């Protein structure tokens, strides 16, 4: 039968390289670059400084990092699991409010919490002054005096990282079918036994995943440990790089840290797989929640309120009062503008790339592409300081090479890219593309292929599908992606610190500098800015969970 | 109190509320030892709530529940679910996903001596024919296998009564039919008194010795499947346990009625006043195709059932009825043929 000219035949060809695919592979190369650079130093010859490190400090870096991770693991589990348990299994006045207030400490970068508590707890600060006035015994005052320690850093990190455990554990508790607990009762087990043998083992992968995420953040933390003088991998990298000027040594330390991170990633992925088997969506537990009143309700409220009090309310009140009454801070507007413009511009750029990757995966699905996308997802696990070193080395080499090429024309050698915002934005791309990607992928996966197909069958062209279906449906996910990237970049410290142009300051960097000069009160306006903006994605997160 | 001693499970004047609605209203029910009972009813009739009350997951409004001569619960006192000796198989299977098949089955045997528990697990694995899959995890099993493990798990501690809450509803029709009979055989073999909840009459017929048909919180009739089908006590029961139609009739004398098919005789006294209007209930198997019959009917619909046809016929007076026909005959829609009644027992309801 002849094909009339009104019918356009579509031929199915083997895919040829196209813009979307090329862009996706380029993005993957960007993520791979710092990783490969850092890892390549594992096999290069050691410098003298490296030998010195191995002889003296390396053991301390390793043991401090492990010890800090261990303390934080205990801390976040100790705060996150009981609060999740209370919220999931009991009803009491204020439960709904507390359940989302418990997320607020996520708005704090740990280093800002550290600056704030140090400011209020230092020797001349209000707390210790009062304690001396009322003649508190030495052993009561001692922990306050020693807040700047490994244990103190662990406490700060636990207070801002426990929401990871809380969120995942709460979801796991809520997703357990009430029938499973009832099955336990009909098999002759009492409440405690059901809790010990069913509820906790089934939530264990989720709790483990939360703890592992918290440990990843802990080993990547620079600001807190630096300020508290705890010698870990990140401070060691910084010290080797700035103090000894030994870039290869810093890279070698970085690659060791990456090994640690790799173990964490494998463990975390493993837990995630088990969560999928363990989650059971049949009958939600909510119906079985037990009512608490009187003294027991008060106990539950108190247990949930304490982490909010110390992780959010106290530091925020301190920061607000210092900002309003005590701080001397020049050029806050300039700093805010720098930060917001940099974070906003980078976030738009990163989400743009994430959209390209998302659509490449949707339109041309293939195994290799999904591997590439998974690989990009690893970027988030890279500590900021490792990314910075991994970007600095090749960009610096490129600058040297360019300058050498331009020498015959007597062009002054300069930092063409390594000391510019290009390097900073590149590092952000490596680290935060995964975040944007996650949001875009989940947005796209909600638009099932059958929706596209029904659009096409109802007469829309491919562009029509995009404008009439995808853009309206994707708007929310894209905005969320931009916002989350924006806030993550705003809080980011070590990469910005190392890569920023010479006289370029952001809120985070300035807060770090002022804290380094012991001007903790003066650091508060910048800190407060970061925290207040950081609240927005936390509120969004809570709303998207509420919809589940 | 003799009643409680001879019966395994006794439910007395039980009323249950679900929120503000009355789910179960003044229900009485007794299961004999080793009996397989069934609560059959449409969704929302209160059957699952009743089951959960027996297990100890739903408070009583009034009445009491006894098990093997001991009071389990009344509105003021209640034995804890874990101390009742009541086993339960759940609608969503509810296997523990973090435990192997063996660990699942052995879950309720934690206070048994190790060797006895091991023997019991082995015995049950044999019973459900999964002895080589003991170390698998639930997600590695098929739906039917999971179902059987759930059964073995609930049977393991030798409960005094086993409750089954629509355990087959998630499975496809064919597997469901096979498993129901299989489970019946297993439970009969172990001699466990059981109570199944379902809305599927075929499942109830396959499983139970006696079936309680429930409607709107009441038990309408508690009887064998044969009696439910052939001697339903109410139009609801008649319709719920199988297809059939009501036909108007007039009481002729103590033991017969006048119908469009002539006078039908009953083997017992009808108990209606002579001359009063009644309805008789006719099932498709009561009406047979009979070319010699003086009554004819028009074929208006037919459903092939393999071994036979289920015809829909219209009588000359306009009444629509179901009728079985041999599948070898292939009548066309609109054709007329003779039909006659073949009734063992007349089902008569007041009009």
Image: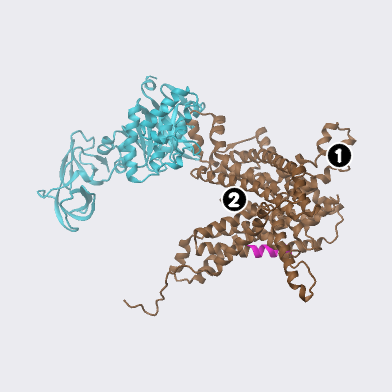
Chain colours: A brown, B cyan
Q: Position of residue A273 (x, y in %)?
A: 53, 46
Mark 2 against mark 1, which lies toward the viewer? 1
Q: Residues within 10 Å of mark 2 (few under 14, many from 20)?
A: few
The residue where tag 1 is placed is: A128
- Chain identifier of the residue bearing label 2 in the image: A
Which of the 4 image quadrants contains residue A532?
bottom right
A545 or A388, nearer to the observer: A388
A245 or A96, nearer to the observer: A245
> In the displayed structure, would residue A335 be above or below residue B255?
below
Q: How many marks?
A: 2
Name the disc covering residue A8, or none. none
Residues rendered magenta in the picture: A341-350
Residue A172 visible in the current orientation: yes
Left-right relation of A290 to B151: right
> In the displayed structure, would residue A16 be above or below residue B337?
below
Residue A169 visible in the current orientation: no
Whether residue A415 is in magenta: the answer is no
Name the disc covering residue A546, or none. 2
Tell me the element at label 2: helix
Q: Position of residue A39 (x, y in %)?
A: 66, 53
- Precedes in sequence: disc 2 or disc 1: 1
Dominant SS of magenta comes to: helix
Q: Residues within 10 Å of mark 1 (few under 14, many from 20)?
A: some
Q: Position of residue B185 (x, y in %)?
A: 32, 32
Left-right relation of B55 to A160: left
Q: Position of residue B234 (x, y in %)?
A: 30, 39
Q: CA distance from mark 2 to mark 1?
A: 42 Å
> In the displayed structure, would residue B38 be above or below residue A61?
above
């Amino acid at each position: 039968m002849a094909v009339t000219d009104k019918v356009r035949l579509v031929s199915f060809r083997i895919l040829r390289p196209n813009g979307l695919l090329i862009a996706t592979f380029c993005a993957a190369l960007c993520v791979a670059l710092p990783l490969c650079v850092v890892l390549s130093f594992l096999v290069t010859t050691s410098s003298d400084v490296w030998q010195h490190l191995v002889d003296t400090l390396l053991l301390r870096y390793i043991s401090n990092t492990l010890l800090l991770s261990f303390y934080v693991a205990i801390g976040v589990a100790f705060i996150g699991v009981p609060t999740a348990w209370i919220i999931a299994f009991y009803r009491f006045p204020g439960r709904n409010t507390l359940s989302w207030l418990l997320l607020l400490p996520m708005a704090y970068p740990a280093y800002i919490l550290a600056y704030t508590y140090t400011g209020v707890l230092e020797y001349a600060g209000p707390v210790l002054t009062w304690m001396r006035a009322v003649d508190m015994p030495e052993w009561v005052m001692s922990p306050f005096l020693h807040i700047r320690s490994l244990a103190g850093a662990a406490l700060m990190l636990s207070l801002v990282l426990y929401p990871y455990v809380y969120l995942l554990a709460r979801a796991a508790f809520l997703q357990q079918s009430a029938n499973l607990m009832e099955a336990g009762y009909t098999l002759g087990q009492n409440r405690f036994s059901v809790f010990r043998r069913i509820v906790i083992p089934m939530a264990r992968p989720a709790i483990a995943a939360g703890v592992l995420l918290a440990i990843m953040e802990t080993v990547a933390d620079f600001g807190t440990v630096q300020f508290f003088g705890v010698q870990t991998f990140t401070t060691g990298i910084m010290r080797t790089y700035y103090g000894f000027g030994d870039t290869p040594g810093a890279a070698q330390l970085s690659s060791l840290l990456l090994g640690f991170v790799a173990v964490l990633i494998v463990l975390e992925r493993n837990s995630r797989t088990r969560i999928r088997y363990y989650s059971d969506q049949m009958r939600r537990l909510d119906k079985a929640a037990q009512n608490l009143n009187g003294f027991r309700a008060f106990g539950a409220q108190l247990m949930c309120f304490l982490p909010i009090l110390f992780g959010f309310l106290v530091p925020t009140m301190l920061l607000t009062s210092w900002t309003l009454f005590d701080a001397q801070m020049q050029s806050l507007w300039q700093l805010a503008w720098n930060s917001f413009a940099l974070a906003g511009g980078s976030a738009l750029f990163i989400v743009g790339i994430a959209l390209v990757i998302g659509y490449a995966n949707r339109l041309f699905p293939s195994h290799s592409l999904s591997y590439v996308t998974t690989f990009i997802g690893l970027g988030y696990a890279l500590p900021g300081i490792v990314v910075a070193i991994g970007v600095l080395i090749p960009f610096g080499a490129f600058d040297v090479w360019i300058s050498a090429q331009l020498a015959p024309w007597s062009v002054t050698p300069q930092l063409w890219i390594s000391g510019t915002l290009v390097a900073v934005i590149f590092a952000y791309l490596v680290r935060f593309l995964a975040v944007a990607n996650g949001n875009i992928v989940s947005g796209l996966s909600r638009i099932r292929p059958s929706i596209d197909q029904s659009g096409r069958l109802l007469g829309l062209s491919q562009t029509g599908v995009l404008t009439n279906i995808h853009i309206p449906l994707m708007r929310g996910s894209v905005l969320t992606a931009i916002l989350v990237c924006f806030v993550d970049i705003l809080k980011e410290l070590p990469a910005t610190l190392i890569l920023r142009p010479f006289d370029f300051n952001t809120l985070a960097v300035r807060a770090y500098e002022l804290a380094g000069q012991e001007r903790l009160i003066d650091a508060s306006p910048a800190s407060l800015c970061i925290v207040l903006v950081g609240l927005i994605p936390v509120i969004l997160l809570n709303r998207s969970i509420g919809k589940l | 109190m003799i009643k409680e001693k001879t019966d395994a499970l006794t439910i007395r004047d039980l009323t249950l509320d679900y929120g503000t609605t009355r789910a179960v209203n003044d229900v009485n029910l007794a299961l004999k030892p080793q009996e397989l009972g069934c609560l059959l009813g449409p969704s929302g009739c209160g059957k699952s709530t009743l089951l959960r009350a027996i297990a100890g997951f739903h408070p009583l409004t009034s009445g009491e529940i006894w098990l093997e001569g001991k009071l389990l619960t009344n509105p003021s006192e209640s034995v804890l679910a874990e101390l009742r000796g009541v086993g339960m198989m759940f609608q969503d299977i509810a296997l523990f996903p973090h435990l192997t098949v063996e660990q699942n089955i052995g879950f309720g045997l934690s206070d048994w001596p190790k060797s006895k528990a091991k023997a019991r697990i082995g015995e049950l694995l044999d019973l459900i024919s999964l002895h080589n899959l003991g170390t698998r995890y639930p997600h590695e099993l098929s739906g039917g296998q999971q179902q059987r493990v759930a059964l073995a798990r609930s049977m393991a501690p030798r409960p005094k009564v086993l409750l089954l809450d629509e355990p087959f509803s998630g499975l496809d029709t064919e597997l469901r039919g096979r498993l129901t009979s299989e489970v019946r055989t297993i439970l009969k073999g172990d001699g466990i008194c059981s109570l199944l909840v379902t809305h599927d009459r075929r499942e109830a017929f396959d499983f139970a010795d006696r079936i309680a048909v429930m409607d709107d919180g009441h038990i309408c009739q508690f009887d064998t499947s044969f009696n439910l089908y052939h001697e339903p006590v109410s139009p609801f029961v008649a319709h719920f346990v199988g297809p059939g139609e009501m036909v108007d009739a007039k009481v002729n004398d103590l033991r017969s009625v006048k119908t469009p098919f002539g006078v039908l005789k009953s083997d017992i006294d009808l108990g209606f006043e002579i001359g009063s209007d009644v309805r008789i209930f006719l099932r498709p198997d009561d009406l047979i195709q009979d070319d010699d019959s003086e009554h004819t009917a028009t074929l208006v619909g037919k459903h092939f059932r393999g071994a036979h046809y289920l015809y829909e016929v219209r009588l000359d007076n306009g009444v629509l009825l179901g009728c079985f026909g041999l599948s070898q005959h292939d009548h066309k829609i609109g054709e007329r043929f003779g039909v006659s009644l073949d009734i063992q027992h007349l089902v008569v309801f007041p009009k």
